[in-house]
Image (cartoon, rainbow, N blue to C red):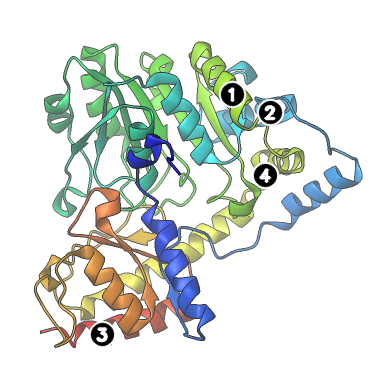
Amino acid sequence: MQLSTLLTRFNEPETLKMAKLGRELRAQGIDVIDLSLGEPDFDTPQHIKDAAIKAINDNWSHYTPVAGFADLREAVCTKLKRDNNLDYKPENIITSTGAKQSLANAIYAVVDNGDEVIIPTPYWVTYSELVKMAGGKVIEIRTTPEAGFKVTPQQFEAAITDKTKLFMFSSPCNPSGAVYSKAELAGLAEVFRKYPNILIISDEIYEYINFVGGHESIAQFDDLKDRVILINGLSKGFAMTGWRLGYIAAANVEIVKACEKIQGQLTSGTCSITQKAAVAALTGNLKPSLEMTEEFTRRRARVMELIKDIPGFKCFAPEGAFYIFPDVSYYYGKTDGTQTIANAADFSMYLLNTANVSSVMGDAFGEPNCVRFSFANSMANIERAWARIKEALAKLK
C-alpha cells in the first residue's frame, strides 16, 4: 500500500511514545513510575463535573456550532478580562477539541509552503511537526539553561529573514518551565514593531501553574494585539485533559474565520457536554486550580532538593509548568558495562529499562542534551522515582 507522503514530513510525539513504552512494561507486571506525560494527577473539580452532569440531564446532546456555544465564547472573554486584563469579543474566539487542535488550526491558517516559523528551543514537541505538516520551515533559536531557556531580542532579530511568517513560543514553557516577565516580553515587542508582517502564536496553556508571580501575555501590548494568536485551554489549569477543550483568541477576526473554516472540515464543534462544563470552569471558583499550583510548588521544591544529590545534572529551576529539564550530557559516553549512553534517547531508555522510570528525551523538544522529567505525580512516587534514578546513574562509569 502506498500511503501519503505527508506521513514522511513529521514524527510521532516522543511524549506519547514513551508513555506507550511505559504501559507495555506495566502490562508485563513491571512497576514503572511515569515522569513522562504532561498531565495533572488531580481529578476535575467538582463544580465542573456538576455542570457536565447538568448538561447531560438537560439534553445538551446535539451538534454544536463550529466555533463553540455563544455562552462559552463569552466565558472565554470573561476569563481573559478577569485574569489578563485583555479585551476580546466572542467573535474573536474559537473553541476546539483541545489546545493541540487550536494550534493546528492557527498554523494551517497562516503558514504556507516555504514560510519560515521561528521557534525558540526548547519547545513543545508538536510545534515543529505541525509547521512541517503545513509545509513551513522551522527556524530554531537555541537557548541555554544559563539564560533561563529564554530567547533574547538580539537572538530573535538575528533569525528574521524576508521569509519569516510566524514566531511561536509558550510561557510558561513546556518543557523548560521558563516564564517570560513583562520586561522580557517588552524587549521582544520592540523587535516585532520593526517587522510588522510577523505573526505571533503565544501558547499560554500553563498560565495558572506559575511559581514566580502573575502571568504576563504578549497580547497586552495594544499595538501588537492584532498580530497575536493566543492559545489556551482547560487541560492543565483545571485538570481536564480528557475533556478536550482548547481555544484561540485573536483580535484579527479574519484569523478566527480561517480557523473556523479549517475546523469545519475536520471536526466541527467540540463536545457539547465539555463546552457546558468549560463555562463553569472559566467563570467559576479558581480555588481548586490555585490549590493544584500550591501542590506543584511543593513538589518542585522537593525535586530540586533530590537532584542536588545527582552528579552531572545542569538544571534550571522551573518558573512554571510541572517539569524539570536538566542537561544530562555529563553521562554521554558512560557505560554500566552493558549499555553505553550516547545521547538523550539512550539516557531515557536506560532509565526506563534499568530504573523503571519514564522520561522524555530532549531531542523531541529541540534540545539534544536535555531530558524532561514531570513532577505531575504524587510526592511518594516522585521520591521513589528519583531514588531509582540516582541508583541507576551511579552505575554509569
Cα gap from disc 1 to disc 3, whole angstroms: 48 Å
SS for callout 4: helix
Of the residues shown, which amino acid type is indicated by label 1?
Ile
* Residue extending farthest right: 58
Q: Quadrant of residue 166?
A: top left
Q: Which mark is residue 10?
A: none
Determine which residue is flagged by label 3. 392
State the CA–CA distance, disc 1 to disc 2.
Answer: 9 Å
Q: Whole-Å distance between the Cαs marked 4 and 3?
A: 42 Å
Instruction: Give residue 284's position: percent from left, percent from top.
Output: 69, 43
Cβ–Cβ under 8 Å for marks 1 and 2: yes
How busy is the neighbourhood of tag 2: few (under 14 within 10 Å), some, or many (20 plus)? many
- In 3D space, how far apart are the residues under numbered discs 4 and 1 (Cα atoms)? 17 Å
> Alpha-carbon distance for marks 3 and 2?
49 Å
Residue 176's place in the image compared with 312, above or below, is above
Dividing the image into 4 quarters, which one contains the N terminus?
top left
Q: Residues within 10 Å of mark 3 (few under 14, many from 20)?
A: some
Along the viewing direction, whichever of 220 and 389 lies nearer the viewer: 389
User: Which callout, 3 or 2, points at the residue further toward the start of the chain?
Assistant: 2
- Which residue matches tag 2? 68
In the image, which disc is placed on residue 93? 1
Indicate the quadrant containing the C terminus: top left, top right, bottom left or bottom right: bottom left
- Which residue type does callout 4 highlight? Ala
Cβ atoms under marks 4 and 1 closer than 8 Å: no
Say what secondary structure mark 3 lies in. Answer: helix
Disc 2 is placed on an element classified as loop
Q: Disc 3 marks which amino acid?
A: Ala
Q: Which residue is mark 4?
A: 281
